[in-house]
Image (cartoon, grey):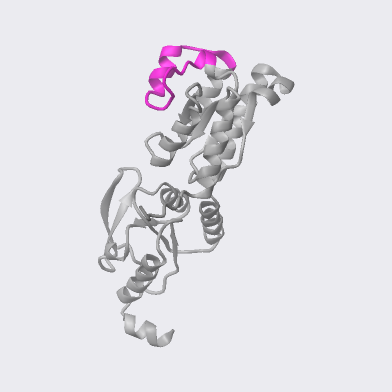
Amino acid sequence: RGCQIVDTTCGDVMSVWKRVRKYASESATSIIHGKAEHEETKATSSRALGNGSGHYLVVLTLADTDYVCDYIRNGGDKEAFLEKFKGAYSPGFDPDVHLQTVGVANQTTMLRGETEEVQRRVRQAIIDRDGPELAEKNFRFFDTICGATQERQDALRELLDVSMDLLLVVGGYNSSNTSHLAEMGEEKLPTYFVLNASRLVSASEIKHYNLHEKREVVSHFWLPNGPAVIGITAGASCPNNLIEETLIRLFELRGISRHELELAA
């Protein structure tokens, strides 16, 4: 009694939910680009069931997408398909039946370029199977990338055009969008994915998350001697104070105290 309930669900996520519900109402299977175990994707998958008759399939990589596209074009071993995507499709999903009409959606924190490529490949597979006219009926898509996530990806792309010695990515290790930023950085230069400023232990030691080993590791001699150009970015939900504290810690490792920074501000 007297308790006001406020729905704080992200508007971008709600747009995805509306889209997959619409797919279900049109008897189109939702192909969701995302991580099947991610909370957002689980929620989206549940909405893709519609009134209970809808279906979904979650693909994580472009290799997964190609596997699905090959099945769309040529059919294949249904049991092998179901085994490959075990845990990533709706109850009763049958690739021989439920890949006839599809709609692509995504976890909002995935890389835009990858989601667009998933859309392109699935659409082409439907065209190859059904022809251009029928493909218009049997394929649907909608841009459902989170605006805040996209802004950070775009900003990082610009930053990576600048010559830098290393990149720090600040944010939660379980954050999908922050992980993608770290992946983008790793393609260009030494990149350290840190939880917060405390992980910058010293100028010769840093604790950071290894995306490939999926655990926090320790690296040494990470900070170059002498002048260095260091980039910093952070995930969409990373509080500003964590970024600020990381910057301050960097200066401290160079012998400049917080007090000196405050005086210079």
Residue toward you, 112 or 54: 54
Give the image location of residue 100, x and y in percent.
59, 18
For residue 70, side relative to residue 86 (left or right): right
Where residue 148 appears, x then y in whole percent? 52, 55
Give the image location of residue 201, x and y in percent: 25, 65
Quarter-of-image position of residue 22 = top right
> 25 or 67: nearer the eye?
25
Horizontal arrangement in the rendering, residue 98 relative to residue 177 (left or right)? right
196 inside magenta stretch: no
- Place residue 145 in its image quadrant: top right
- Residue at the extreme bottom: 263
Residue located 63% across and 22% down the image: 126
Position of 242 with respect to 220 (left or right) is right
Residue at (46%, 18%) from the top-left corner? 93
Q: Quadrant of the C terminus?
A: bottom left
Q: Which residues are magenta?
A: 73-97
Relative image position of residue 215 (x, y in whole percent) = 28, 47
161 vs 251: above or below: above
Front-lying residue, 196 or 107: 107
Residue 57, placed above or below residue 43 = above
Residue under the point 61% across and 25% down: 26
Against 137, residue 62 (above or below) is: below
Identify the residue at horizontal 35%, vertical 75% (top origin). 251
Seen as rendered, the residue at the extreme right is: 133
- Report the side of 10 relative to 223 (left or right): right
Q: Is residue 15 above or below residue 93?
A: below
Asked whether the viewer can see residue 225, the reply is no
Query: In this orientation, does residue 117 appear?
Result: yes
Q: Most extreme residue toward the front, as rendered?
A: 1
Find residue 84 and report its image quarter.
Answer: top left
> In the rendered picture of this protein, how many numbered marks are placed on residues?
0
